[in-house]
C-alpha cells in the first residue's frame, strides 16, 4: 500500500508481529468532525517509512547517541541530576558505560507544585528560556534531533492526566504525554493520539523523530507486548527555547499523579533517525517470548517442589496476586463506595454537638437488639468555664442505618456540672479529664470480664501525661478509663481493630516521631502492647501525609482505609484509600491514588473531608454500609503553611456531619480487559489461579 491509497499525513500506525506474518492495524484519524476508519493491511514492510515525511531522513539502524541518562533517582527539588546547563555532565554517560539502574521519576503537580510557574521545566537539559543551548543539548541549528526513552508508566491514565517529555528545537516544541495505555498529544495543533498500547506491565520504548525546520515530527513506540505504532506530532511555535524538558501535570482538574520508571534516555542532535518499526516488533516479540518461556520454566520448577497452597472456608476476593499464577490482558480495578443520595444521615444538630458530628468513633450492629449503633464525637463551646471547647463522645441508634435517633442516656451533664443530663453523651472532657479525641469502641468477642465487653483507646492529656489511654465498658454506654497512658509515643488520629484471624488487638497508630506515617502495635490482653511498627512511611519529598487509619478483618484478610491528607491545587482534602494485609504486619496499597470515598465538590457538606469510622462495615442485605464524616471547612495545612493560595476559600459555615456509602458484599474490585480485541486468539484475556488445595470448599467471590 502507498500513502496515496487513502493514508494521509495524519495517520497513526499500529501493528503487531504475529508468528511469520506482519499484521498492521492502520487507523486514520482526521479532523474531529470526520469519522475515523480502520484498515487492515498484510504483507507490508515499507509502509512505515513511506508515511514519514521526506525531510526526516537518516540511517534508521545506526544512531550514534550523543548522550544517555543513566543516573540515580531524580531529586524532588530544583537542583539535581537532570538540571542543565553544563555543570552536571557527570550524571550523563555515553552509551555503553556500565549497567543502567532503574530510575524512578515522579512528574506531577502533586509533587512539584511548590514552584508552579516553572513546574513544566523542573527537569531539563539545555536552555528552556533561551535559544543558546548547551553542550548537552543544542537542537537549534543541527540537522534534526532524535530522542529514545525506555520507560514504564506506573501511574498515569485518563484524558489530560499524564506527563511526558517536551523537546524544543530552537523555535518549536514537540511532545506527547505518556499514559499507561499509550500516547496522548499535547494539543499543539492537528496532532493525534495513539491509544490501545501497554506502557505499564513492562518497559516500552518511545522515540521522538524531530525535523530541523519546524515541520511535523513523529513519536514512534513499541510497547511491553511488542506492539508498534507511531503518531504525528505537530509543533508549537515558541519565541525561544532550546531544551529537553520533563513535562508534568495535565489538563485535568485537579492534575492527577503520574509516575514513570525509566531505564534510560538517549538523544542526539545530529540527525532525525526514524526507527524500523518492523525490526522493533520482531525484537520485542522475541524478548517477550523469551521472558514468558523463562517464567514458565521457573514456575514449573517451583510447582514441582512445593506443597500446594491450602485454603480455608473464606471467600477469595482476588484483591492482590497471592492466588494468581499468571494473568494476561486483564487488570484489577478497585471499586469506590457509592454515596447515599440522602446524605448526611447524622447531623450535629443537638446543642451539645455544636454543629459537629465527627466519626472519630465506630459503628456496630448490636448482637442482641439488632440495632445499628454509631459512636460519634461532638464539640461545643461551654459557657460555664473558660474552656475553648468541650469534647464529647455520643451515641446514635438506627434500625435501618439511614434514620438515626439519639437516646436519652442521662449520664453526663451538658454545659457544666448542673446542666441537664437529657442527652446521648457517653464520654466527655467533663468526666474524663483531658479527653481529646478518637474513642473508637469495638466489641471484644473473647472477653471473660463482663465489665470489659467493649474496648477502646483514646488520646488525652491527663494528670500531666499526654498520650493514648485505655478505656473499657460493659455495654458501650458506661465507660471507665486508665489513669496512666498505654502509649506515650503516639499522637492523635488513632483507632483499634479486633483481629478475629489471630485473636488479638491491633492499634492503628500515629507515631509521635513521625506523625505523617502510620504504625501498628499488637496485644493479646489489651494491656501489654508490642513496640510500634511503621507500615506506611511518609515521604516528605513527595509531600505525603497519612493522617489516620481504620481497619477490619474480612474473609481472612486484613483490610484498611488510610486517610491521606492531600495538599494540592484542586485537591485540598482528606480522603480514605484502600489497603490490605495478609498477616496484619505487612500492608500494601490497593489504590494509592483514587479515594475509596472521594471528597465532595465546592460548597458541599463533604468538600474537605471524608474520614472513616473505625471497625468493620455493617452488612445490610447484600450491601456493606460504610460511615464517614464530611466537613465544610479545611484542615490546617502541613506542607502548605506558607502557601495559602493552595487552600480553597471556605464557602459555607463550618459544619461536620456523618454520611453513608455502600458497596456490594465482596464487591471490592473487578477485572478489566485491555490490549487488543477480545476476539484475538493470541490476546485472550485470562487469569490462572495457583495450584491450591480446597479445604472445606473455599468460595470464590464474584469478579463482577
Image: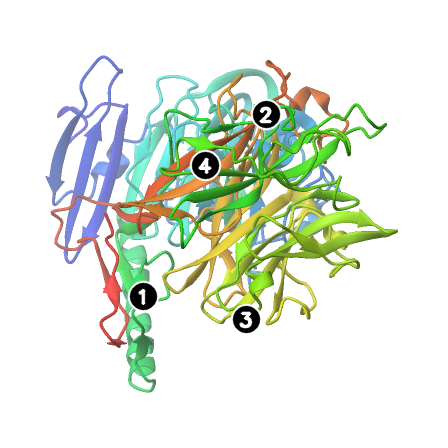
Residue 130 appears anywhere in the view: no
Q: Nearer the viewer, residue 228 or 539?
A: 539
Per the image, the residue denoted by label 3 is 448
Mark 2 → mark 3, Cα distance in angstroms: 37 Å
Mark 2 → mark 1, Cα distance in angstroms: 43 Å
> Contact (CB < 8 A) between labels 4 and 3?
no
**View extreme (bottom): residue:** 305
Q: Nearer the viewer, residue 160 or 641?
A: 641
Per the image, the residue denoted by label 2 is 350
Q: Nearer the viewer, residue 36 or 217?
A: 36
Residue at 32% in and 71% down: 295
Residue 352 is situated, as x and y percent measured from the top left of the image, at 65, 28
The secondary structure type at the circle numbered 4 is: loop
Per the image, the residue denoted by label 4 is 597
Per the image, the residue denoted by label 1 is 314
Residue 424 is situated, as x and y percent measured from the top left of the image, at 58, 36
Of badges 2 and 1, the one in the foreground is: 2
Of badges 3 and 1, the one in the foreground is: 3
* Sooner in the amino-acid sequence: mark 3 or mark 1: 1
Give the image quarter of residue 98. bottom right
Amino acid at each position: 500500500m502507498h500513502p496515496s491509497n487513502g493514508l494521509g499525513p495524519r495517520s497513526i500506525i499500529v501493528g503487531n508481529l504475529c508468528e511469520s506474518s506482519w499484521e498492521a492495524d492502520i487507523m486514520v484519524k482526521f479532523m474531529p468532525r470526520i469519522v475515523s476508519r480502520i484498515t487492515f493491511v498484510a504483507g507490508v514492510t515499507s509502509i512505515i517509512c513511506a508515511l514519514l515525511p521526506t525531510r526526516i531522513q537518516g540511517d534508521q539502524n545506526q544512531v550514534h547517541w550523543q548522550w544517555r541518562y543513566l543516573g540515580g533517582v531524580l531529586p524532588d527539588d530544583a537542583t539535581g541530576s537532570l538540571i542543565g546547563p553544563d555543570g552536571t555532565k557527570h550524571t550523563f554517560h555515553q552509551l555503553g558505560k556500565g549497567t543502567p539502574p532503574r530510575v524512578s521519576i515522579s512528574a506531577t503537580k502533586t509533587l512539584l507544585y511548590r514552584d508552579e510557574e516553572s513546574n513544566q521545566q523542573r527537569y531539563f537539559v539545555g536552555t528552556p528560556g533561551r535559544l543558546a543551548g548547551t553542550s548537552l543539548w543544542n537542537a537549534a541549528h543541527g540537522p534534526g534531533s532524535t530522542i529514545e526513552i525506555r520507560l514504564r508508566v506506573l501511574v498515569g491514565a485518563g484524558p489530560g492526566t499524564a506527563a511526558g517529555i517536551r523537546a524544543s528545537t530552537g523555535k518549536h516544541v514537540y511532545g506527547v504525554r505518556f499514559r499507561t495505555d499509550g500516547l496522548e498529544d499535547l494539543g499543539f495543533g492537528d496532532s493525534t493520539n495513539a491509544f490501545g498500547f501497554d506502557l505499564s506491565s513492562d518497559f516500552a520504548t518511545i522515540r521522538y523523530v524531530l525535523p530541523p525546520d519546524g515541520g511535523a515530527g513523529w513519536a514512534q513506540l513499541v510497547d511491553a507486548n511488542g506492539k508498534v505504532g507511531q503518531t504525528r506530532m505537530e509543533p508549537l511555535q515558541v519565541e525561544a527555547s532550546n531544551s529537553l524538558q520533563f513535562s508534568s501535570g495535565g489538563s485535568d482538574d485537579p492534575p492527577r499523579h503520574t509516575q514513570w520508571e525509566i531505564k534510560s534516555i538517549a538523544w542526539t542532535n545530529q540527525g532525525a533517525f526514524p526507527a524500523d518499526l518492523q525490526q522493533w516488533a520482531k525484537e520485542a516479540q522475541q524478548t517477550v517470548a523469551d521472558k514468558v518461556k523463562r517464567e514458565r520454566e521457573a514456575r514449573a520448577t517451583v510447582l514441582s517442589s512445593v506443597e500446594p497452597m491450602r485454603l480455608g472456608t473464606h471467600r477469595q476476593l482476588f484483591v492482590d496476586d497471592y492466588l494468581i499464577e499468571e494473568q494476561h490482558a486483564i487488570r484489577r480495578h478497585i471499586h469506590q463506595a457509592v454515596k447515599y443520595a440522602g446524605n448526611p444521615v447524622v447531623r450535629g444538630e443537638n446543642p451539645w454537638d455544636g454543629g459537629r458530628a465527627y466519626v472519630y468513633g465506630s459503628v456496630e450492629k448490636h448482637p442482641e437488639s439488632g440495632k445499628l449503633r454509631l459512636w460519634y464525637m461532638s464539640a461545643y463551646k461551654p459557657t460555664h468555664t473558660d474552656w475553648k471547647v468541650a469534647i464529647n463522645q455520643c451515641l446514635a441508634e438506627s434500625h435501618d442505618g439511614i434514620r438515626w435517633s439519639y437516646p436519652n442516656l442521662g449520664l453526663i451533664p451538658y454545659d457544666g456540672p448542673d446542666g441537664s443530663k437529657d442527652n446521648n453523651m457517653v464520654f466527655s472532657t467533663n468526666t474524663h479529664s483531658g479527653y481529646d479525641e478518637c474513642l473508637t469502641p469495638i466489641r471484644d468477642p473473647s472477653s471473660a470480664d463482663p465489665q470489659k465487653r467493649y474496648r477502646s483507646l483514646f488520646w488525652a492529656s491527663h494528670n500531666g501525661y499526654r498520650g493514648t489511654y485505655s478505656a473499657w465498658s460493659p455495654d458501650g454506654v458506661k465507660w471507665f478509663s486508665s489513669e496512666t497512658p498505654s502509649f506515650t509515643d503516639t499522637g492523635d488520629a488513632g483507632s483499634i481493630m479486633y483481629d478475629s484471624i489471630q485473636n488479638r488487638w491491633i492499634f492503628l497508630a500515629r507515631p509521635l516521631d513521625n506523625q505523617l506515617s502510620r504504625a501498628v502495635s499488637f496485644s493479646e490482653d489489651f494491656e501489654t502492647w508490642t513496640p510500634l511498627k511503621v507500615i506506611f512511611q511518609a515521604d516528605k519529598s513527595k509531600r505525603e501525609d497519612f493522617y489516620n487509619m481504620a481497619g477490619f478483618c474480612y474473609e481472612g484478610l486484613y483490610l484498611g482505609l488510610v486517610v491521606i491528607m492531600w495538599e494540592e491545587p484542586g485537591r485540598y482534602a482528606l480522603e480514605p484509600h484502600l489497603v490490605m494485609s495478609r498477616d496484619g504486619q505487612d500492608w500494601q496499597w490497593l489504590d494509592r491514588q483514587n479515594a475509596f470515598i472521594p471528597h465532595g465538590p465546592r460548597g458541599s457538606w463533604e468538600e474537605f473531608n471524608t474520614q472513616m469510622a473505625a471497625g468493620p462495615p455493617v452488612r445490610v442485605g447484600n450491601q456493606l454500609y460504610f460511615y464517614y464524616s464530611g466537613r465544610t471547612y479545611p484542615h490546617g495545612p502541613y506542607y502548605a503553611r506558607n502557601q495559602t493560595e493552595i487552600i480553597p476559600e471556605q464557602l459555607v459555615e463550618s459544619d461536620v456531619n456523618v454520611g453513608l456509602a455502600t458497596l456490594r458484599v465482596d464487591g471490592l474490585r473487578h477485572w478489566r480487559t485491555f490490549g487488543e480485541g477480545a476476539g484475538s486468539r493470541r490476546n485472550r484475556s485470562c487469569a490462572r489461579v495457583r495450584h491450591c488445595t480446597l479445604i472445606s470448599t473455599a468460595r470464590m467471590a464474584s469478579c463482577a
